[in-house]
Image (cartoon, grey):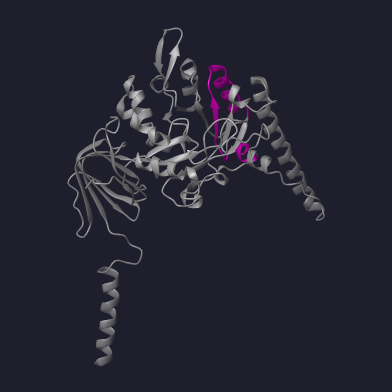
Amino acid sequence: MFQRSVVIAAVFIILSGLFIFPTEGEEKVIAIRAGKVHTVTGGIIENGIILIKNGKFLAVGKGIEIPEGATVIEVPQGVVTPGLIDTHSHLGLGPSGGITEDNEMTSPATPGLRIIDSLHPRGLMPHQDSYLDAIAEGVTTVIARPGSGNVIGGLSALIKLGGETVDEMIIRFPQDMKMAMGARGGALPGYPATRMGTAWTVRKAMNEAQEYADQWEEYRKEKEKNKDATPPKIDLDKEALLQVMKGELPVHIHCGPTVDILTAIRLGEEFHFKKLSLGHATGGCKVAEELAKRGVAVVVGPQMMVFDEEREELVNLADCLLRAGVKVNIMTDADVVQQEFLRFQAAMAIKYGMNPEEALKAITIYPAQLVEAADRLGSIEEGKDADLVIFDGDPFDIMTRVLRVFINGKLVYEKKGES
């Protein structure tokens, strides 16, 4: 009888641990009740409720039951959006442009360089405050890129800003290969000095990478016959470009005038880039249909307005491309424009006629789609990473303040003095 009682008690303790007490590592539910929730993909929810658990959105909607014991955040006048995303940034690398940490100036082509080796972990370098400044204005994710001091700058990284070390911040590395056309691609003193030379540099590097691949294929065949066959020397630059040639890695090209845009398109088709996106592309309106037809995305900014000589007026670059069917992101090119001003870049596009919903998408879901991470980022949906921003008003009003920011369900910023 005693043994039976002991067994029953043991079973009760085990079941209590399973069904009553939270399991190790399980987090409490966070419930946010806000005046307005911009889900981005599911419309706007008035007086909406968001549930967060274990770093993910558990539910979002109206009239959702809040679990007992949840941490409840009440912001009846608050406006909630997903965390903001900038797909063309040099955040944490020092001042952009010229000979700085984000521009390698030793060679026209440095495809093997890794941007993660230059990122300043928070708290270790003077520029670390730029991460905190960005978070405090709702920016949660960026693509950190090499600069445009040479033609092929190297490998970019998709990072979240909430980590304390580079490795904690990385979502995906490498994200893409950064290149630059035209005058920027020829910024390296000496060579290449022309647009023809810039394009030739890309072709030369890509063809040399193909020759390198052929050498390794010959070696593998020879190895089957002769185990003592000598392998080719490892070349990190060519190894990186092989990822582009095999269709494993997208390419992002800095360009401005229409002539450079067309050259970038030409190179993309010539070498069968997996996915091509352009940065800046200030001449894009003149070839918007070509860009749309080829599925080339454009990351617009920091120059949001361009002068149209034919119409003799300023044209909203983002809106012009979007109306033609081009996939548009909006960027800061931080630190050209400080990273924290991403939403104000979008506000500038709205001022000159862009639809506000599209402007919000251009700094949330469209960037997530560009980087093939829309299953995790860019909208407030069940199962996605719980990255969100709580504003005290319209996100695109210059007077609106950020009240709280969450990354992966963790509160990473809270405005002092705000409940």
Q: Position of residue 67 (x, y in %)?
A: 21, 57
Q: Is residue 386 left or right of residue 373?
A: left
Q: Quadrant of the N terminus?
A: bottom left
Q: Nearer the viewer, residue 353 or 21?
A: 353
Residue 34 inside the magenta-drawn segment:
no
Q: Position of residue 33 (x, y in %)?
A: 20, 46
Residue 265 inside the magenta-drawn segment:
yes
Q: Is residue 197 above or below residue 238?
A: above
Q: Position of residue 414 (x, y in %)?
A: 30, 47
Q: Is residue 277 left or right of residue 243?
A: left
Q: Position of residue 341 (x, y in %)?
A: 38, 33
Q: Nearer the viewer, residue 140 or 228?
A: 140
Residue at coordinates 50% horizontally, 28% vertically from top-left? 279
Report the span colored magenta.
Answer: 242-271
Judged from this view, the residue extending furthest toward the front is 126
Residue at coordinates 57% horizontally, 46% vertically from top-left? 117
Residue at coordinates 29% horizontally, 33% vertically from top-left? 395
Q: Nearer the viewer, residue 393 or 259?
A: 393
Count of all numbered marks drawn on residues in the image: 0
Q: Quadrant of residue 177?
A: top right
